[in-house]
Image (tube, rainbow, N blue to C red):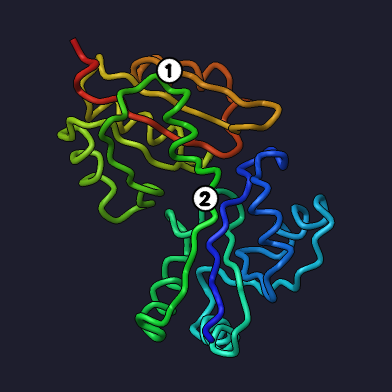
Amino acid sequence: MIGTLYIIATPIGNLADISFRAVETLRSVDMLFCEDTRVTKKLLTHYDIHTPCVSYHSFSGFGKIHKAITMLREGKDVALVSDAGTPVISDPGVKFVREIRNVLGDAAVIQTVPGPSAVTAALSISGAPCSSFVFLGFLPRKKRRETVFQQIAAEERTVVCYEAPHRLLKTLESLREHIAPAREIIVVREMTKVHEQVISGTAADVLKYYHEHPDMVRGEIVLIISSLDTVA
């Protein structure tokens, strides 16, 4: 009998933001594959969970995936988590799940243990229209960057992306150059943590704020470009 692979969502900041089922599943599986064992062990220690962990990240080869496949074939249960939020969403876990499906085919038993996601959490407090939206993951660092901003400018739906603090100002400058001047930008920062912050306004307004408050350019950032429906 093939074991089960559980895809488990974990907190994006506040360790209390985890479901009872997620804690129970983390305890019950035979092996936990995680992006960074040091990050995941903080969560496991908090809930007194002693499941063995193996790191699986963007630089991992197929060896660890095949280790999981071997365990599943032996009838053992394994789980995949990311450092925060829902695995596979802009996350190296996509290769993990895809390979297991490719190798095991219809025999694969993969279950989701849903929970926190930075994308939906940010949208929920942004006020931006989100009945339909586009998620871009992390914006490209160099290649295709100009093309992406042109695409954002032409996109009528709300756009959501992740951005690193050290690139935030440059990104806001590019948005100011490319998108409609009145289009709303929302920066959602450090969600569920002590210094959670939402700053909104035109690209020029938000850029001005962060130039005046450089100490706030830090932490985990979700950037939202509101849909053209909100532009008069």
Q: Is 7 situated above or below 141?
A: below
- Badge 1 density bin: few <14, some 14–19, many ≥20, Cα 10 Å: some
Q: Distance between the Cα atoms at labels 1 and 2?
A: 29 Å
Q: Is 56 situated above or below 211?
A: below
Q: Residue furthest left?
A: 154
Q: Residue at x 30, y 35 (%)?
A: 159
Direction from residue 60 to residue 194 in the image, left or right: right
Q: Residue furthest front?
A: 1
Q: Residue at x 20, y 32 (%)?
A: 153
Q: Residue at x 49, y 16 (%)?
A: 209
- The spot of residue 139 in percent (x, y) is 37, 47
- The spot of residue 178 in percent (x, y) is 22, 30
For the residue marked with disc 2, what is the amino acid?
Pro
Residue hosting label 2: 114
Q: Earlier in the sequence, mark 1 or mark 2?
A: 2
Mark 2 secondary-structure assignment = loop
Disc 1 + disc 2, Cβ < 8 Å: no
Q: Which quadrant of the view contains residue 155? A: top left
Looking at the image, which is closer to me, 179 or 18?
A: 18
Mark 1 secondary-structure assignment = strand
Q: Residue at x 84, y 56 (%)?
A: 48
Residue hosting label 1: 200
- Badge 2 density bin: few <14, some 14–19, many ≥20, Cα 10 Å: some
The mark lying in front, picked from 1 and 2, is 2
Direction from residue 40 to residue 74 in the image, left or right: left
For the residue marked with disc 1, what is the amino acid?
Ser
Direction from residue 167 to residue 38 in the image, left or right: right
